[in-house]
Image (cartoon, helix red, strand yellow):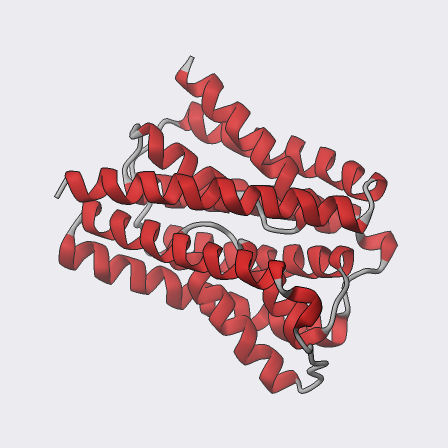
Amino acid sequence: MLHVLIFIVCLLSSTAGGICGIGGGVIIKPVVDALGVLSVSALSFLSGLTVLSMSCISVYKQRKRRLVDMKTGTPLALGAAVGGLAGKAIFDVIKTSVGEAPVGLIQSIALGIITLLTLLYMMHRAKITTHNVKSPVLCAVIGLLLGVMSSFLGIGGGPINLCVLYFFFSMDTKKAAANSLYVILFSQAASALSTVAQGKIPEFSWLLLILMVAGGVLGGMLGHKLNEKLSAKQVDKLFVALLVLIILICVYNAFRFAGMM
């Protein structure tokens, strides 16, 4: 039953992530963390693979819509790939230094703060002047920072991607979602390959891996279809609702990890 529950979480999270462009890991990580059934390392790895599978499907499905701006999206994605490696290295160093529970606490607090700032941005988005960055170097630097955060937190990309794309590139909701998933694809691929290459794959049930990835693939397909049918305003409303949910779960997880120390 527990495996089925996690599969459902991955399916629903990946569907919502595919619609909004947040990857799904930002929901999977805190929700499964709250269940207390996996180590921080195992969950970060499995969540990353789930998001990777979802983003692969979503990016493939969206190729005909040409929503990804390759001139800015590719430098962002390449920067995110490097950032994904750096974020994974930072996670490993902190986990080795302080242990599983403290790194889980750090992840929960950091994700909660980032999500809260994203919610505040969304509430005041109409009043904020945006930019239109064209420099490939600056795009790569922005992607690097996004990759570091997403890989360290084990969330794939999360709400911060959309805010960055709104603010620095003046993208509309659906274009930002497509470009966010493109960036997530590169950062998560780099992080996963690094873990495998270094032989640092944590212990987990292979059945659980199959179920989570299957949830990611199915969610990516369903999210793509719903994204085409929903209006930009409806996508924004779903995004805000998810932000509130994520903040509440992060608060719960922060107290739970603090109690384990």
Q: Is residue 58 left or right of residue 162?
A: right
Q: In the orientation shown, which residue stands out farthest toward the top?
A: 1
Residue 7 seen in the figure: yes
Q: Is residue 103 left or right of residue 80?
A: left
Q: Residue at x 48, y 61 (%)?
A: 117
Residue 206: x %, y % from top left: 41, 27
Q: Residue at x 28, y 55 (%)?
A: 106
Residue 227: x %, y % from top left: 77, 43
Pick the front one: 86 or 34: 34
Specify the quadrant of the image occupied by residue 35: top left
Residue 129: x %, y % from top left: 68, 78
Quarter the C terminus occupies? top left
* Vertical side of 173 occupied by 54: above or below: above
Pick the front one: 101 or 220: 101
Q: Residue at x 68, y 71 (%)?
A: 127
Q: Residue at x 36, y 57 (%)?
A: 110
* Vertical side of 140 occupied by 165: above or below: above
Residue 68: x %, y % from top left: 77, 63
Quarter the N terminus occupies? top left
Q: Is residue 157 left or right of residue 179?
A: left
* Vertical side of 149 occupied by 252: above or below: above
Q: How many marks?
A: 0
Residue 46 seen in the figure: no
Q: In the orientation shown, which residue stands out farthest toward the left?
A: 261
Pick the front one: 40 or 235: 235
